Amino acid sequence: MLRSLSTKIVFAIVAAAVIVVAIAAVAWKSYDDRERMRVHAEAVTGGDSWRGEALFIQYGCGSCHALRDVRTATGDVGPPLDGIATRMIIAGHLANNPPNLEHWIQDPQHVSPGTAMPDLGVITGDARDITAFHYTRAK
Ligand code: HEC
């Protein structure tokens, strides 16, 4: 009786340990994927994606665009920006690459005269950082 109780306790401890390790592995994988995405985004754009996220909030982009995990980004005037990193075309007609995205963020009215996205006076360094932030967002 006593022996079978201690066997059950050992079994429960082993099962709990296996579950904890599995959860930690999944969490690590997801952290690692996001970190790789961030390193890649910064390498291709030359921008600072952390600063870009803060600027995205500061310029009020989220009043028109929804973006997961950004609390203030709930707008639905423009398209949601989740998965922007892997989209082929942006703003209806531009190839999605760092210079085009940066140019778009900085000067949408010049790229597509009359578009509903206004020029927000985003300066060059800020546009680069926001571009880096965008390229951290795959689906
Ligand atoms: C007043 C609303 C508004 C604000 C503010 C705004 N946008 Fe937009 N945005 C739009 C609209 C509308 C479009 C679609 C334009 C088009 O396709 O011609 C768009 C398109 C885009 C696209 C292309 C998305 C795609 O899937 O093609 C990106 C990227 C983008 N905006 C980023 C930003 C960033 C970064 C900011 C802040 C600096 C911002 N927007 C602020 C309305 C807005």
Image (tube, grey):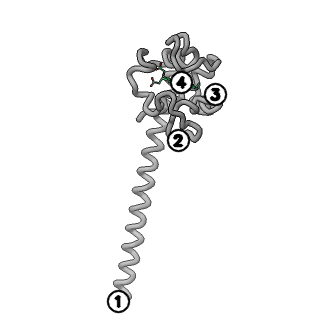
Mark 2 lies within 8 Å of ligand 1 (Cβ measured): no
Residue denoted by label 4: 131
- Neighbor class of circle 3 (other Cα within 10 Å; few <14, some 14-19, many 20+) is few
- Cβ–Cβ below 8 Å for labels 4 and 1? no
Q: Quadrant of the C terminus?
A: top left
Using the numbered discs, state the Cα–Cα distance from disc 4 to disc 3 in whole angstroms. 13 Å
Using the numbered discs, state the Cα–Cα distance from disc 1 to disc 2 in whole angstroms. 52 Å
- Neighbor class of circle 4 (other Cα within 10 Å; few <14, some 14-19, many 20+) is many
Residue depth check, mark 4 versus mark 3: number of the one nearer the observer: 3
Residue depth check, mark 4 versus mark 2: number of the one nearer the observer: 2
The tag earlier along the polypeptide, 4 or 1, is 1
- Cβ–Cβ below 8 Å for labels 1 and 2? no
Residue denoted by label 1: 1
* Left or right: where 38 falls relative to 16: right
The tag earlier along the polypeptide, 4 or 2, is 2
Q: Quadrant of the N terminus?
A: bottom left
Tell me where residue 46 appears, x and y as whole percent: 55, 21
Tell me where residue 24 appears, x and y as whole percent: 45, 54
SS label for mark 4: helix
Above or below, 3 against 101 in this view is below
Image quadrant of residue 83? top left
SS label for mark 2: loop
Mark 3 lies within 8 Å of ligand 1 (Cβ measured): yes
Residue at left 54%, top 34%?
75
- Neighbor class of circle 2 (other Cα within 10 Å; few <14, some 14-19, many 20+) is few
The tag earlier along the polypeptide, 3 or 2, is 3
SS label for mark 3: loop
Residue denoted by label 3: 59
Residue depth check, mark 1 versus mark 2: number of the one nearer the observer: 2
- Cβ–Cβ below 8 Å for labels 1 and 3? no
